[in-house]
Image (spheres, grey):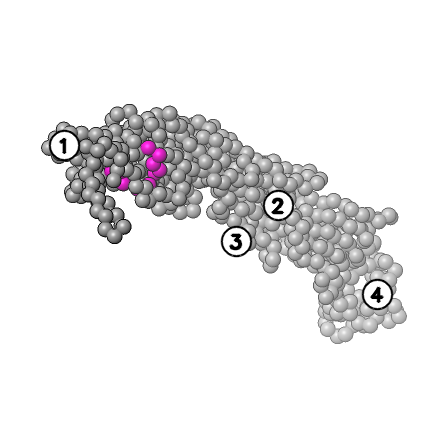
Amino acid sequence: CNLRPKSQRSCLVLFVLHVAAVTCTPGPLVDIVVDRYDIPKVCSREVQTEDFVRYHFNGTFHEDGKKFDSSHDRGKAFISQVGLGRLITGMDRGLQGMCVNERRRITVPPHLAYGSVGTGGVIPPDAVLVFDVLLLDIWSAEDKVQIRTLSKPASCNRTSVVSDYIRYHYNGTLLSGEAFDSSYSRNSTYDTYLGQGYLIKGMDEGLLGMCVGEKRIIIVPPFLAYGENGSGTRIPPQATLVFEVLLVDLFNPKDDLMVQVKEVPEGCTRRTKTGDYIRYHYNGTFQDGSPFDSSYQRNSTYNTYIGMGYVIRGIDKALQGLCIGEKRRVIVPPHMAYGEEGVGDLIPGSAVLVFDIHVIDFHNPNDPVHIKVTHKPKGCSMKSETDDLIQYRYNCSLMDGTLLYSSDKLDSPSFTTLGTNGVISGLEKGLSGMCEGERREVVVPPHWGHGENGAGGVPGSAVLFFELELVELQKGVPEGYMFVWLGDSPNPLFPAMDLNGDNEVPLEEFSEFLMLQIKEGKGRLRPGTDADAVIKDMFNNQDRNEDGKIVVDELKLKTDEQSERMKRDEL
């Protein structure tokens, strides 16, 4: 029995074999009864007086369970303020302390509901009401935007401010956890100016002060979101919105190029300028670190002229003033890159681009061959020139130090005759004017080397660096000659050739004579040739009747033959 006055009590007491049984008829409720039958594990906030709430409910009569109202049936949650008399007293009390996503059953006696009068023919007098409630949202007029940082990059050189243009991904949910939108599902960032009214007020505020790569939760109360009207079918009126945000990119329309010098080699004597042709490697990423391109993956440098519009404006500017071997990080705002359009699926619109650049080499189309003598022996009197046969040692490298070729790795010594196009023109120039034992460093631009196409391991448009040493020098003879006099020839010549004075010179005598001139330093054979073969060829040219000997009437110098030929041409 409940403890009420005797006049209101109805009890039947039976005593049987010392056992008492009591049957009572329940009386009316004095207060609400709250059954919290489903409570979420996490409850960050409970309903308090003056809070606004948005909830779904089913309303039934306690007596027979018949439904008299339902927000579910109307498809629209109920919105009100708690504790200020805008709800029936029982609900004002029953909603106190409730969590979002909590389900509770609130039983309300008549005197805390519609009393002895009822309402509108729907609620009869003295009806006990049962409300099955699901709380969807809580907010207060004093609420502010809530920000919870989930993760932040280790280094952050810049944070978002008003007027910045930002690109971010987000998942948007209601406070109950129901999703209403996601940029990830569209596979596209949300791009906008910050603080310019393009976003709801809460997001304009919540996105301030973020670093690229930062993740945060932004909770926006309804009056800083879509308010009483909601938005479309996914965001109901007076909904608190929860955004999980990842800032992908940010820049300001006033931004200029940002250059971070990572490494500069010692002894840099020359820097790039407009008109130079440069070869460089790069890794291209977005500000969040995700890659979009890399020359390293293609195993090929990017080659271009500087300051002539062949690359995006930001890179054209960033390539100025660089040294060979220098490394830079270049941050290019979109208005100096690919702008609002981007590049297909590769680069999104309005993307800030980050390039890590390594300069391999550069040159100017007007560059000469650069020669630096690193060692010159004393008493250098004889120097290499056209037609000379030389033996030389060399290392050939790219300007970043990559060794391409070395004579030390060859099976035989390196020889060439200068002036015969046996080597690239830049190396020919570098080998000219050297003494035996001299060492040089020679820089050969591509137009003096292998040009735009490269050759056999040499990349196109590559500047080459040679380390040279002249090992042996054999003076040569002019093109078209097999033997030259180093002074005046004997005059008359035939008696000097006719060593035994018999008025005829066979091959053996002719050969003996020439070798004597060479030994005495009076004449020179073409170097690098078979001396016996050359002398025999010279003999055959003079033995005009081919009888195996030369007589005085047959002997003519090459200069005499040329003179006679010119006279005939004049006639």
Q: Secondary structure at mark 4?
A: helix
Marks 2 and 1, the one that precedes in the sequence: 1
Amino acid type for the residue under numbered disc 2: Asp
Mark closer to the observer (2, 1): 1
Residue beneath disc 4: 515
Q: CA distance from mark 4 to mark 2?
A: 51 Å
- Position above or below: 489 against 333: below
Marks 1 and 4, the one that precedes in the sequence: 1
346 sits left or right of 81 in the view: right
Circle 4/circle 2 CB separation < 8 Å: no
User: Toward the viewer: 401 or 2?
Assistant: 2
Q: In percent of the image, x 58 and y 53: which residue is there?
A: 459
In the rendered image, residue 419, in percent from the top left (x then y), is placed at 69, 54
Mark closer to the observer (3, 2): 3
Marks 4 and 2, the one that precedes in the sequence: 2
User: Toward the viewer: 335 or 196?
Assistant: 196
- Position above or below: 339 against 422: above
Amino acid type for the residue under numbered disc 1: Pro
Residue beneath disc 3: 298
Q: CA distance from mark 3 to mark 4?
A: 60 Å
Q: Secondary structure at mark 1?
A: loop
Residue beneath disc 2: 361
* Image quadrant occupied by the C terminus: bottom right
Marks 3 and 2, the one that precedes in the sequence: 3
Circle 1/circle 4 CB separation < 8 Å: no
* Image quadrant occupied by the N terminus: top left
- Magenta span contains residue 332: no
User: Toward the viewer: 499 or 268?
Assistant: 268
